[in-house]
Amino acid sequence: MTAQMRALAPEAGPKVLRIGLVQGGRIVHERVVKQRVSVTVGADDAAMFPILAEDMPSSGALFLLFERRGDDYYVNFTPEMTGRIALRGGIVALEALRREAPSVRLTEDARGRIVVGGSTFLFQFVPPPPAQPRPQLPLSATKGGVATEIDWQLTIVAAFSFLLHFGFIGAMYSDWMDPAVDEQIAVNGLIDSLKAVALPLPVETPPDSPRERSPLEMPPESKAESPSKTSKSPKDGDGSMSDRGAAALAREADAIQMQLLASLGGPSAVHGALGRGDVPLPDLSGVAGQASGVDTAGGLRVGSAGGGVIQPGRAGGGLAGIGRTGSSGIGERAGDAREVQGPKGAAQIGAPQTSVPVANAESVVAALRPKFRQCYQRYGLSVDPSMAGAVTIVTKVGPNGEVSAADPSGVSGLSNEVVSCIQRAVRNASFAAPGGTGGVIQIPIKFVQQR
């Protein structure tokens, strides 16, 4: 930009001649003589300003109008020329100058008008125009491609930064700096360390040790007696219980358990005991032959004479009268259960009104009646048995028959839950395609209780 401003600055030096040719009332040619050379006019092609032949002076076909002599300009004129010239002394007519000399020296502040036939020349001295700058290609045309657009200094710095950071991180997680390990020595050391580990010896459990029993499996005398009196049970000489004594205690506990099940549950309890795996099968015959029952104190009686298995509902047992009530002792039956149902609702649907013809509007609405009644029954009568009311669903149907909106209108007596349920049922419906831009269907619904 500085170079261009310097080129546009006016050059210091003598002024140059500026000439304009006027023909027919308008300027047809204008020129600045930057080289400060002589100016010729005439009908010849060699003339700087061509004019018509009839406008030429009688001196010839080419006339030297402005002549350069040294560093100065002189204007030459003939008797046929008229006009005025402004000099330092003032404006002088060309006729007055012609009486003194055939030419006049022009200074840099001179200007004037010279008429030659039908052509008029206007002239003045002006500073020389600025030199035209040297034509240059645009900056984009001088670039050498993508490589010239890269800031190589920044690119090199970024590359070294990446190498430094990622190289440091890679060195942290690599094993380059770890000492070399001989695999054979490491394996041998591992084997030696495993040999030095002391493994625990297996503990053998004697097969004849008595199993632990729950309190129900223990005999009655063992429950009543304290631990200090357990010496009465059959034992071996070394203080441990013998196999025969343990077997006897197990049989007694199984018999007591069978009697207890038979007393509480009857045959069903017996069958349940038979299905258990902890009851010895050889002892079932003995269990069935024993008498069992419940005494007046509520305790379990084992081995009582004349007794038998107590079964509910049979005479002779203390539990047979459990289901009987009354002060007279006579059995009375409880009343029969009766299921009480809530109120039932009915949905009454009026004739749907459509803005455009919809082929299956009535059939689709009629198919929605069970869903409307279900909404009324579930969200209405189950909450408020006295609920009753009406609503009109304004349904917007698209061109393809899909329901785009279902808005309630004129809601009376119904809860928001019932109305929302009805809206969902209508939105899931599908009508015949009405075409065009769709249509609107108004569905009036009334809900009442069935009598």
Image (tube, helix red, strand yellow):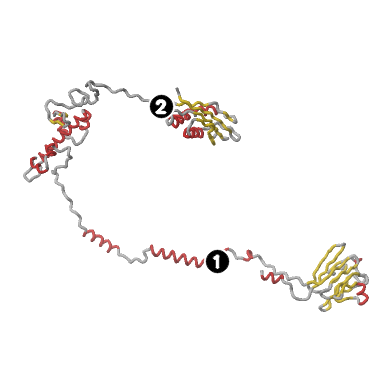
* Front-most of residues 288 and 132: 288
Left or right, 364 with reference to 121: left
Secondary structure beneath label 1: loop
What residue did someone put label 2 on?
A: 342
Residue 164 position in % (x across, y down): 44, 66
Q: Residue at x 30, y 63 (%)?
A: 183
Left or right, 302 with reference to 156: left
What residue did someone put label 1 on?
A: 151
Q: Residues within 10 Å of mark 1 (few under 14, many from 20)?
A: few
Q: Quadrant of residue 325?
A: top left
Nearer mark to the viewer, of 2 and 1: 2
Residue farthest to the bottom?
70
Residue 53 position in % (x across, y down): 90, 66
**Three-letter amino acid code at the position of disc 2:** Gly
Q: Residue at x 13, y 35 (%)?
A: 252
- Residue 322 to residue 280: above or below: above
Q: Residue at x 53, y 35 (%)?
A: 407
Q: Residues within 10 Å of mark 2 (few under 14, many from 20)?
A: few
Sequence order check: which comes first, mark 2 or mark 1?
Answer: 1
Please identify the quadrant where the N terminus is shown: bottom right
Q: Quadrant of residue 212?
A: top left
Residue 417 position in % (x across, y down): 47, 34
Secondary structure beneath label 2: loop
Q: Residue at x 15, y 36 (%)?
A: 253
Q: Quadrant of residue 326?
A: top left
